[in-house]
Image: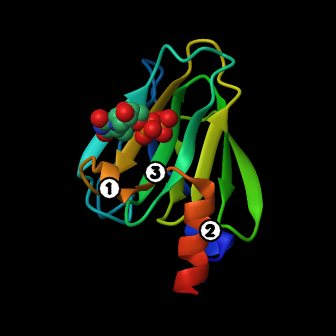
Amino acid sequence: MNSLNSSVSEIELPQIHDPRGDLTFVEGGNHVPFSIARVYYLYNVPVDAERGGHAHRELEQVVFALSGSFRMKVDDGFSKTEYWLRDPRRGLHIKNMIWREMDSFSQGAVCMVLASHPYDESDYYRDYGEFQQALRAGS
Ligand code: TYD
């Protein structure tokens, strides 16, 4: 059984503070506990948009608000919690088999996601009932 505490955790990246502007970097297998196979980002998100609404069979991700803020709701089928992402240094590591929904995007927010695998639609659960059924079958 997945525990929400062991499946969702915050990651803090290094920051090189500089009066010319701050710099943050991320290395797969070091700051992020998997090899980074894909990077994607959400932008031009309307403030009333809802994103996500799915879980992944195998995929792990680390999600950042590079600019602005948004809410990430996570659910392991047994308990739910939410995080506000607003700091480009602080990512949310979400392991597989976690249902996630994102909303309350600020104007101009940019969400960057580091992913452990290339895009594969067959890795998605897009139906919450199917996700719950898979959890019950696996536990
Ligand atoms: P989706 O993962 O549902 O977006 P979000 O969780 O951010 O709301 O993906 C939206 C659409 O984009 C869907 O048709 C699949 C496609 N897509 C890709 O083609 N490649 C990708 O790497 C991602 C993340 C999505």
Q: Could you tell me residue 110's position as x and y percent?
A: 49, 24
Q: Which of 17 and 40 is in front in this view?
A: 40
Tell me where residue 101 sits by quadrant: top right
Q: Which of marks 3 and 2 is nearer the N terminus?
A: 3
Q: Could you tell me residue 90's position as x and y percent?
A: 56, 45
> Does residue 82 appear in this view?
yes
- Pointer 2: what residue? 132
For label 2, the SS is helix
Q: Please, what is the three-letter code of the amino acid marked with disc 2?
A: Gln
Tags 3 and 2 touching, CB below 8 Å: no
For label 3, the SS is strand
Q: Please, what is the three-letter code of the amino acid marked with disc 1?
A: Ser
Seen at 23% across and 52% down, the residue is 37
Q: Is residue 39 above or below residue 104?
A: below
- Whereabouts is ligand 1, in terms of quadrant? top left
Seen at 62% across and 68% down, the residue is 132
Q: Which colour scheme is used?
A: rainbow
Cα separation, mark 2 vs mark 1, equals 17 Å
Q: Which of marks 2 and 1 is nearer the N terminus?
A: 1
Q: Please, what is the three-letter code of the amino acid marked with disc 3?
A: Val
- Pointer 3: what residue? 62
Q: Residues within 10 Å of mark 2 (few under 14, many from 20)?
A: some
Q: Residue 122's mark?
A: 1
| Camera-nearest label, 3 or 2 | 2
Tell me where residue 123 sits by quadrant: bottom left
